[in-house]
Amino acid sequence: MAPAVQQAGDLPRPMGRLGSVYGLKGWIKVQSFTSRPEDLFDYSPWYIRRRGEEWREVRVEDYAQHGGAFIVKLCGVSTPEEGKNFTGMEIGIRRSSLPRAPQGAIYLQDLIGCNVIGLEGVMLGKVLRIWDHGAAPVMEVSPSDRPAHGKKDNLLIPYVAGPIVKEVDLSSKTVRVEWGEDY
């Protein structure tokens, strides 16, 4: 495994997760977060980490479709015991490795770190992470810059362009939403 990634400007973005070990040669099941799961294998190199740890570069030796999912063989992993060391790790791809977003579109991961401004110009906090598990992605907004009402819980704001998300300006790192502090 390569040393940890140190460059802050082009940190990997979570694009998948390694699952359980498959077979006797160290293959690992893959959960892809890309719109077409097979697209994850178009990007190289991969970076992996456990949440809260540093990203580390790994190389994909091979991959295969298995049923409705995919499995991967990482370089240097040849037994189930070695593969178990990677179970549950996030798979990251550097932003610079991804294609440009089409005109008028954004990568939701680019919202991380943006200031969220709600009703009447109230600063709600910063986007901490994006959850995408259903009908609409959800922005988790930290309360670090939201002193009013003494709230300490993170806000969960659906990313619905139009009714809720009114404007995104990545150059100024702001997201304007139709959302109040007390929602």
Image (cartoon, grey):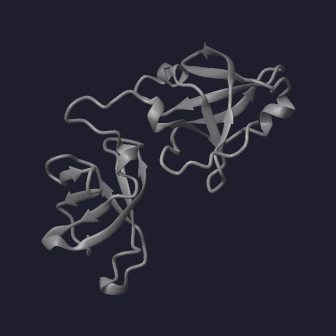
Q: Quadrant of residue 52?
A: bottom right
Please tell me which residue lies in front, 51 or 29: 51
Please tell me which residue lies in front, 102 or 81: 102
* Number of numbered markers: 0
- Residue 53 against residue 28 in the figure, above or below: below
The residue positioned 35% from the left and 51% from the top of the image is 111
Does 140 sit left or right of 19 as displayed?
left
For the N terminus, the quadrant is top right
Q: Position of residue 9 (x, y in %)?
A: 48, 48
For the C terminus, the quadrant is bottom left
Q: Quadrant of residue 179?
A: bottom left
Does 179 sit left or right of 49 as displayed?
left
The residue positioned 51% from the left and 19% from the top of the image is 42
The residue positioned 26% from the left and 51% from the top of the image is 171
The residue positioned 20% from the left and 59% from the top of the image is 176
- Residue 120 against residue 74 in the figure, above or below: below
Q: Position of residue 177 (x, y in %)?
A: 20, 59
Does 112 sit left or right of 59 as displayed?
left
